[in-house]
Structure formats: structure tokens, C-alpha cells
Image (cartoon, coloured by chain):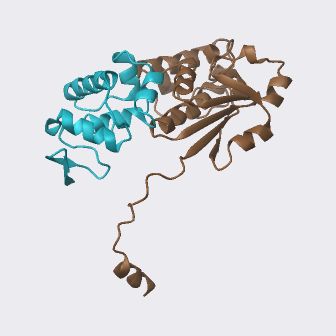
Amino acid sequence: METATVTATATTPAFVVTPEEKPRHIAFICSKGTLDMAYPALVMGWAALGNGIDVTIFFTFWGLDMINKNRVDHIEIAPVGNTAMKMSMMGLDTGNLGIPQIAGVLPGMTAFATKLMKDKMRALDVPTVREYLQMLSDAGAKLYACKMSVDMMGLKQEDFVEGVEAIVTAGDFMDMTAGAQIVFI
Amino acid sequence: MAMREIAGHQVQVNEEGFMTDPQEWTKDIAVEIAKVEGIPELTLQHWQVIDFCRQDGMATGKAPTLRRITTAAGVTTKEMFALFPKGPAKKVAKISGLGKPEGCV
């Protein structure tokens, strides 16, 4: 009954919204240092900027590897413990057969899996992590390193790639992201 | 799909305001859409990007992504965000009479 009343009175289409509202702001917290977990914030952050959304990225714990000058080009993915990684990744017609965990522990397997994944990304013209960070920072994203993690790992501002604005505390991060949507990775 | 009059021309647009037939585009349409998108005046540099997008769009059948523009047109990311603030690839595609750019990069 109530539905019918609503339908009858709704004359303005629901998609008519005012465009000049407060700009949307998305903040990503990157806490992982593996290849598969490095990309989500980079891809979504770039998409957000492309949609006129403000972006802040906070790197903490292993996520610091993503902005560490000496590590950013050596981010890897390990087959060990990763049930989603199948033999077919290597171009074998093996369906859902996983890479045997025992094979994953062999020396060189992590480097091999990493190479396979990076080759696939290169073939699709996906930027490297270093390049993505540059693009994000050029496009106006704010990149910050977490103070506690930085202290814990004995790092300094000069250890980070260009574009990382500052080392900030968790409290600073909360202040900077008031009203933002937060994505933890 | 709807018809809209832009700069005295009747053109087809989709629900997001992107033109659906790039053949209907003219330079005065670009100037009008740019104003609506918050760019009061198109400079030479704006036109260089628009010209690239038109050529690329007509050749490939789809609007170039931001990465395509920065790698192929010789414009940097910084310049793109300065020229077409808040979503440059979408903005320039709209001004160039092309569809919304697709792709994650």
C-alpha cells in the first residue's frame, strides 16, 4: 500500500543529484608487501583520481616495501600457502590443479612465480608499482608512511620514493581522513 | 539515449552526457561542453590533447584512457590534471565527443 503511494508521487527521477557537493575522498591503508596486495590500492586509487575523487594512501608495516626505494622494484608473490595459484598459470593445461606446496618451497619458486605474474602484467601494459606511485603522486594523491612502522624498521624519509609527503602518526592519519571512505588492504 | 542542443547543434548524448556519435562533434561543441565541465577557455595545450583524443578515438573506436594519453600524446600526468582537473580522461573524452574511456589504467 505504502509503495503504491510513493510510486504515484515520485515525479522527479532519482538520479538527479546536485553535482557540486563536497568532493568524495577515499583513503587506502596499505599494510602488505606482496605483489598481489600492492596493486589493489594503486589501481583503485588511480581510478578514483580519474573520477575526480581525492585520494590519500597510508603505508604501514609491510606496505612500507611499496614505497621503499630499495624494495619497490622487488615486490614478490610466493606460491607457498597460496591456494589460488594454479599450475595453469605456467601455461599448462592442468585445469584447477594447484602448484604443489612442496614445490613452492624450492629455491627460486617465488622468483619464478613473481616473474610469471610480472610478465602477464607487462603484456597488459600495467604500470610497475614504482611507476604507479609516480602517476598517483603526479595526479595529486597524498602518500604517507606510518611513523610507528618506520621507527620499527629503522627507516627514514630518504629511504622512500619521491612523492611520499611525510611520515605521520596514526592520529595524524585520522585527522587527514575525516569524512573519507577508508579501505584497509 | 537523448537529443541535446549544444552550440546550436542537435546531438545524441547518453545518460551521463557523453556524445554517442563522434561524427556529430564540432569544435564549437567542444568549447560549450568544456564550459559546462568547468574549463572556461580552451588553450592551445587543451586543443593538442583534444586533437590527439579525436584522432585516437576515431582510429580505435574508443576514447583513450589517461595512461594512453600520457604515453602516446607526450603530455604528463601532472599537465593533464592541471588542464582538465578532476578526472582528466573522462573530461577530455566528453569534450572530444567520444564515449567514456574504459579500462583500469
Asked if residue A126 shows in the view, the reply is no
> Could you tell me which quadrant the N terminus of chain B lies in?
bottom left
Q: Quadrant of the C terminus of chain B?
A: top left
Location of residue A103 by image quarter: top right
Residue A129 spot, x, y in % from top left: 57, 21
- Find the residue positioned furthest to the front: B41
Residue depicted at 38% across the width and 41% down the height: B38
Q: Is residue B3 above or below residue A132?
A: below
Residue that appears at 67% across and 43% down: A177
Residue at the farthest bottom position: A1
The chain assigned the colour cyan in the figure is: B
Q: Is residue B34 visible?
A: yes
Relative vertical location of residue A161 with respect to residue A21 in this rendering, above or below: above
- Report the front residue among A5 and A85: A5
- Quarter of the image where one finds residue A82: top right
Hue of chain A?
brown
